[in-house]
Amino acid sequence: MAMPQNSTTENGFCFTQTLNFSRPSPPPGETGRTFEALGGRGACGTLLSNGTASSSVPSPSDSCAEPLCSPTPGEEETQFDEGVKYVSADGEELACGWRGFTPGCLQLFNTSKGVLFFLCVASFLQGMTVNGFINTVITSIERRFDLRSYQSGLIASSYDIAACVCLTFVSYFGGNGHKPRWLGWGVLVMGLGSLLFALPHFTTGRYEALSAAEVGICGGNQSLPCARVASSLSSYRFVFMLGQFLHGMGATPLYTLGVTYLDENVKTSYSPVYIAVFYTAAILGPAAGYLVGGMFLNIYTEIGREIDITPENTLWVGAWWIGFLGAGAASLLISVPILGYPHRLPGSQRYIVMRVSEAHQLKDGSRKKASDPDFGKTVKDLPRSVLLLLKNPTFIFLCLAGATEATLIAGMSTFGPKFLESQFSLSASEAATFFGYLVVPAGGGGTFLGGFLVNKFKLRCSGIIKLCLLCTVSSLLAIFIFFIHCPNMPMAGVTQMYKGSALPGGHLNLTAACNAECGCLQETYSPVCGSDDVMYYSPCHAGCKKVSENLRNGKKVYHECSCIDKTFLPGDAEAGKCTSSCARRPLLLFFVFVVILFTFLSSIPALTATLRCVSDRQRSFALGIQWIVVRTLGGIPGPIAFGSMIDKSCLLWQDQCGEQGSCYVYQNSAMSRYTLIAGLVYKVLGTTFFLVACLLYKPPPPESAPGSSDTSENGNCDLQEHKPSLRAGGDI
């Protein structure tokens, strides 16, 4: 029995009934050209009796990507022993595979859903590595390799620096090239960066942590060497910076070319949902990175070696490198299938042909230059491409609005755990976990919901910008919650004197008569909670002379503490901060959730509006330029701006042998006030930019969008869903 042969028209689209386009009747002679663009040499009149070809080889037709129809005489067909080869009318290879190796089983994944799955895995790995593992292990890396805070800051910034350097090149040439190959090689480079980041663990000697069981109590060995010899281990920061640079290079195509590849290969009204799923995976990645990275940090870095210190000890270094090894290997594996995808998916040409342009209309008509098929293929067109985008006011103000939102997101992700830690008197790990519980439903849910709303209400570009404006105003109102705060837990020598009275003039005084003979060092910060519900700087500063372990929770308990009064006898203290019983905690958490939700709710609509307000051939390049603006004006300075404002509320600074280090204790009222000021400034700016973008947007006239019917986009999918008729005049 001969195998049924597959034939496609130019766009791989078969019609079984007449399409009624909701547009004015064209002049004589144009109708033929319209259907010529759609059908190439002609459209197929009928499908097989059951609507599919009886081929035993899986094909993309199952996913509504390449419908099968009876062959037209004279059409060229290519048939192989193992199945059907999918090619467009112009000879472009549309099968999934690597060069000549295109097995039939791979064609099951040659659909928009298959691409979405692999891109989601890649974005999940990127988020888990860069925004999860890096932020989780940075303290351990500082301790292991004797790095200072500004050096670790350079390591973190190397990612954004690499992205800014590569964005113009990748988005311009990759946007006009073979996008899946750019994406696949990018994910591969990202995997190499993760493996390189873990390399220093294997090239250095063993980490030696000195036992410090008795250090910190009154009368114990309080010596702490200040004049440490500069360690050569700090030179490994350049290896970490290179690893982060590779992370930035590899992730650059993912959020520019990946988004446009999805947008080009799905129905326009479904595009926001696909992009929302893609970005939701990128947001869930950091949450997984915090959880998995925190779990690995409970394992000692020298696996299999016995050690007498616990993870709570300041000398402990966890197995920071395991996550990077796993993420690197997974990135290398996931790059292989991405490299096998074709330049465009089978059947996607009908979406491109029938797409309605919503690009902002320029008075000089220069948008027509960008529609030229030869435009953007050489370096000579680069300045003109930049000029066209700069002349698009809607695009410019959407970029500026994105930068303000990115500033808030970067500031919240960096200092959100610190805010919760200070307000609710939590440990660093508890605050990070708590913040993760807020970000996953609020950030991930908001991202997906934004794309869903655009698709649900069939919003066009102007409606999408109005949705962004509504979300920004809502989060602006919610941010006023920072007017309230939780009071600081009392801390002897910091917020109050040792006998309970206020500090004179607010000056720090950690020394009192009860601990004067202990010889306590300010370099050893290890807070304890006394039985009098007052926090102390360390067991030594509480005058504690003995230590034991609580069998219930494993925490250390200090006894005979002379600074803690308990019925005229020395009291006890337990390691860690005192727990806060703030009555405003539920209200504060709810509105922080709302701020995060509406901030992320506008992200996908804003991205969709950016894609629609520029011409099709400039989409990848426009995303690249937008990412540069967002990173340089938002992502990079965001943490710096928030950090500098929050540092103004510091009560107690770390003392590193006379040099000021990081902040130990913040004044909660001042922290809330400065957070409110920063949030209001950026939210007001974001609201203004979205409003101006909405006012300046000029949609194209209706007559300039031939084929503005949803019919073409539903195409064969409507037939396969057994709908009685094709809609006309739907929203694109």
Image: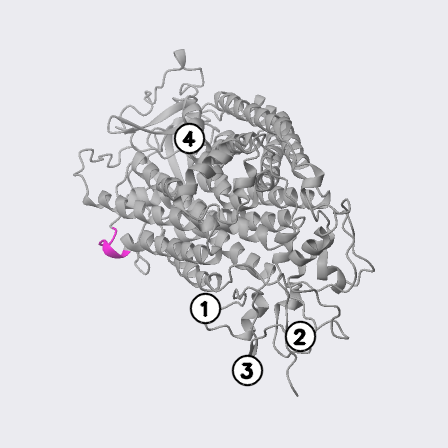
Which residue is denoted by mark 1 in the rendering? Answer: 98
Vertical position of residue 688 compared to residue 4: above or below: above
Q: Secondary structure at mark 4?
A: helix
The residue lying toward the viewer, choosing from 285 and 453, is 453
Q: Dot 1, how many residues are within 10 Å of its Cα: few (below 14), some (14-19), or many (20+)?
A: some
Task: Calculate the distance from the C-alpha at mark 2 to the C-alpha at mark 1.
Answer: 31 Å
Q: Quadrant of the rendered structure where residue 192 is? A: bottom left
Q: Position of residue 273 (x, y in %)?
A: 64, 49
| Residue type at numbered disc 2 | Pro
| Residue type at numbered disc 4 | Pro
| Residue type at numbered disc 3 | Asp
Residue sitting farthest toward the right: 724
Residue interval drawn in magenta: 202-207
Which residue is denoted by mark 4 in the rendering? Answer: 637
Q: Secondary structure at mark 3?
A: loop
Sequence-wise first label, 2 or 4: 2
Vertical position of residue 340 compared to residue 485: above or below: below
Task: Calculate the distance from the C-alpha at mark 4 to the C-alpha at mark 3.
Answer: 58 Å
Circle on res. 542: none
Residue 426 visible in the current orientation:
no
Sequence-wise first label, 1 or 4: 1
Task: Calculate the distance from the C-alpha at mark 3 to the C-alpha at mark 2.
Answer: 22 Å
Sequence-wise first label, 2 or 1: 2
- The structure residue drawn at horizontal position 48% and vertical position 43%, both measured from the top left corner, is 621
Q: Nearer the viewer, mark 1 or mark 4?
A: 1
Q: Nearer the viewer, mark 4 or mark 3?
A: 3
